[in-house]
Amino acid sequence: MTTTHRRRRRRRGEPRARAEAPAPDAPAQPGVSAGDGGVDTGDSGIALRFARMCATVAAVLPFGLSRVVDPTFIGFALINGFTFSVDLLLLTAMHGWLGWPIEVSIALGYAAAFGLGFVLNRTLNFRSHAPAGRQVLLYVVVVAINFGVILLGVGAGLAAVGVEYHLARVAAGVCEGVFMYCAMRWVVFGRRGDTPA
C-alpha cells in the first residue's frame, strides 16, 4: 500500500473532522436533526416531528412566553396529559369494571402512567440516547420523592390546615408538574455523557 492510499492518522489532542452541515434547502432525513449540524442522532421520524411540533407551539405562545418556555415543557405537558388520561382509564377499568380494590387500582394505574411517561419523555421529548439503566434508577427516586413529599406532603398538608381537599390536590398537582419537569430535564435526562446510539 502506498502512502497516497493510507489514511491519515489523527494525533492525540487533534480535533476530529466535523461533519458538513447539509444545505439549507436539502430535504430532512429521518434521524438527522438540523439542530445537530446534520449529524445522525438516531432519532426516529416520529420523535423529530414531535420535537418540531413542540417548538412550533412554543414559538407562538403569547405574552412573551415564547421567549421563556422551552419546547420540552410543551412536550412534557402533552405527554403527561396523555399519561394522566391513561391513569384514569386504567383506574376506571380496574376498579369500576373489574371491581378490584381502589388501593390496588390506584397503585397500578399510577405505576403504569409513570412508566409510560418515562418511555415517551425519553424517546419523544428529551430524545435521550444515554444508557437507560441509570435513568430508570434516577426516575424511580424522583417518582418516590414526588409521591412522598409533594403528593402526600403538600396535598395532605394543605388539607390538614383546612384547605378544601380538591384545591389541595390541584395545588399538589401544580407542584408535582413543576418538580417532575425540572427533575426530568436536568437530572434524569440531563445531557451529561449523552451520546447518540
Image: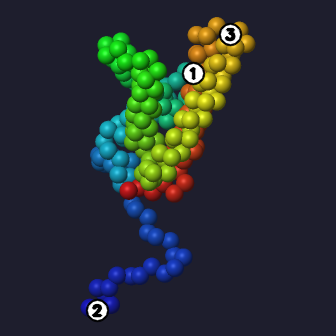
Q: Residue at x 31, y 13 (%)?
A: 97
Q: Secondary structure at mark 3?
A: loop
Q: Residue at x 38, y 15 (%)?
A: 95
Between the residue at mark 2 and the residue at mark 3, the CA separation in whole angstroms equals 82 Å
On the image, which quarter does residue 180 sit in? Answer: top right
The number of discs equals: 3
Query: Quick one: label 3, few (<14), some, or many (20+) residues within 10 Å?
Result: some
In which quadrant of the rendered image does the C terminus lie? bottom left
Q: Secondary structure at mark 2?
A: loop
- Residue 41 sits above or below residue 55 on the image: below
Asked if labels 3 and 2 touch by Cβ distance under 8 angstroms, the answer is: no
* Whether residue 98 is situated above or below residue 126 in the rendered picture: above
Residue at the spot x=32%, y=85% of the render?
6
Measured Cα–Cα span from mark 3 to mark 1: 14 Å
Q: Picture coordinates of residue 166 (x, y %)?
A: 58, 10
The residue depicted at 57 percent of the width and 45 percent of the height is 187
Residue type of the residue flagged with mark 2: Thr
Q: Quadrant of residue 96?
A: top left
Q: Which residue position is annotated with label 3?
A: 163
Which label sits on residue 173? 1
User: The N terminus lies in which quarter of the figure?
Assistant: bottom left
Q: Residue furthest right?
A: 161
- Front tag of 2 and 3: 3
Residue 94 percent coordinates (x, y): 35, 19
